[in-house]
Image (cartoon, helix red, strand yellow):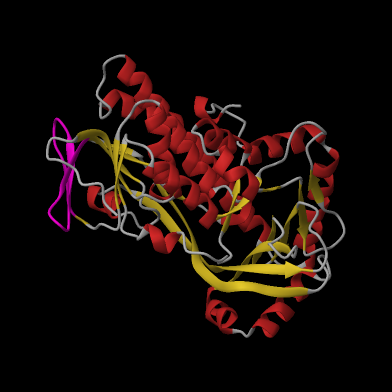
Amino acid sequence: MSTKAKPSDTRDLLILGGGLVGMTLALAAAKKGISSHVVDRADPASLTAEGFDGRASAISTASWNLFTNIGLADALEAHGCPIEKIAVSDQLKPGRIDFQPEEGEGSLGRMFANRQLRVALFEAAKAEPLIAWHAPADVTLRERGNHGVSATLADGTVLAARLMVAAEGRRSPTREEAGFTIANWQYDHRAIIAGLIHSRPHENVAWEIFYPEGPFALLPMLDDEQGRHRSALVWTVDEEDGDGVLAMGDRAFIAEVEKRMGRLFGDLEANGPRSSYPLGFHHTARIVDHRLALVGDAAHGIHPIAGQGLNLGLRDAGALVEVIAEGKRLGLDPGDAQLLKRYESWRGLDSFMVSLATDGLTRLFGVSGPGASAIRRFGMVGVQRLDPLKRWFMDEARGVSGDVPALMQG
């Protein structure tokens, strides 16, 4: 699908990457009267095809506020499973932490199938005149000049705008072409993504069970149409074991899963296909350049240990829109260097601190041996008893601490 652009159709933003972060950015911008071209290589029809592929996202309280404020709550409300509690355990041994808000404080977040998020975003984008959506489309040339930016598509269409935004994910070609300095390393681990059906209800509890090779996360999903209880699994395995786990038959796979979660949810069966991706860390030293801003995984890729990757990208989108909207009120161009500097100083430190924290957690729980496990569990018992510390962790998980963009406030 492509909304053909006229040569004179210069928009405020040229968003390269129309995934969850890129399209949320376009819709949030439109709410503030900011126009955009959105370009994505993928075919929207394939991204919204029926069926559950195991890929799901934890949407924090702040991110849910953003979706509500850009008009997506009605389309999404019925499809999200509230996370009422997070249970953190070291190998299911005694001494765990339970993060549970006080009554009346709302949930710790909501779980959505990624497909459902895309359906809501794409439907809203189709109906929004301030968004010109070009997909599937390949970019063959990117240009950033003194007075604007442009992208040439494979069919010869030239899209013009004031500011280019790279939202293409971890392997952002726009970021690479612009020569951003990036710190990155691999964990030599792979995340196995799968759906589970189980005989006992999950009671809206998300489980993070740590093993030396990595975390084993069980994330609550809504029951399916047949009333079967469902969860999404994100299981970290050594890189060398990844292909073997993907190739297992369902029975062998479920037997391996049961070894790690016991009978927590009763009888298990596989739900849908399995997928995987390699786990790594990357963080750019800067997130802006001349008429260019990075958002989401183009700027920072973190371990899924705390489920904060997408929420971090949505915070980028909320902050960038706020900065540009304030600049426009003062008559400033969206690509103005001072506006971009403000965006970078706002988001740079927050995303870096979250990235460091998740990397530290990954390393802390990756130390093997009974002594290390005992020390961790002793520390967890301490956190369990310290309400102020637990509250700080919960506020971080909900995305309500620090300088929160206006669109992400309640």
| Quadrant in which residue 230 is drawn | bottom right
Instruction: Judge left or right: residue 212 versus residue 310.
Output: right
The image shows residue 288, relative to residue 378, as above or below, that is above
Instruction: Judge left or right: residue 298 versus residue 410.
Output: left
Image spot of residue 287 (x, y percent) = 36, 39
Image spot of residue 109 (x, y percent) = 66, 43
The image shows residue 202, relative to residue 390, as above or below, that is below
Instruction: Judge left or right: residue 219 versus residue 286.
Output: right
Residue 46 in view in this figure: yes
Image spot of residue 181 (x, y percent) = 32, 48
Residue 320 in view in this figure: no
Q: Quadrant of the N terminus?
A: bottom left
For the point 41% across and 64% down, which residue is it?
46
Magenta segment includes 72: no
For the point 30% across and 37% down, which residue is it?
36
Q: Nearer the viewer, residue 204 or 51?
A: 51
Q: Nearer the viewer, residue 382 or 240?
A: 240
| Quadrant in which residue 374 is drawn | bottom right
Q: Nearer the viewer, residue 335 or 41?
A: 41
Image spot of residue 141 (x, y percent) = 16, 52
The image shows residue 7, relative to residue 213, as above or below, that is above
Magenta stretch? Answer: 140-161
For the point 61% across and 55% down, which residue is it?
305
| In the image, farthest residue toward the top | 330
The image shows residue 350, relative to residue 191, as above or below, that is above
- Number of numbered discs on residues: 0
| Quadrant in which residue 59 is drawn | top right
Q: Quadrant of the C terminus?
A: top right
Q: Nearer the viewer, residue 403 or 325?
A: 325
For the point 33% across and 29% down, which residue is it?
34
- Dominant SS type (magenta): strand
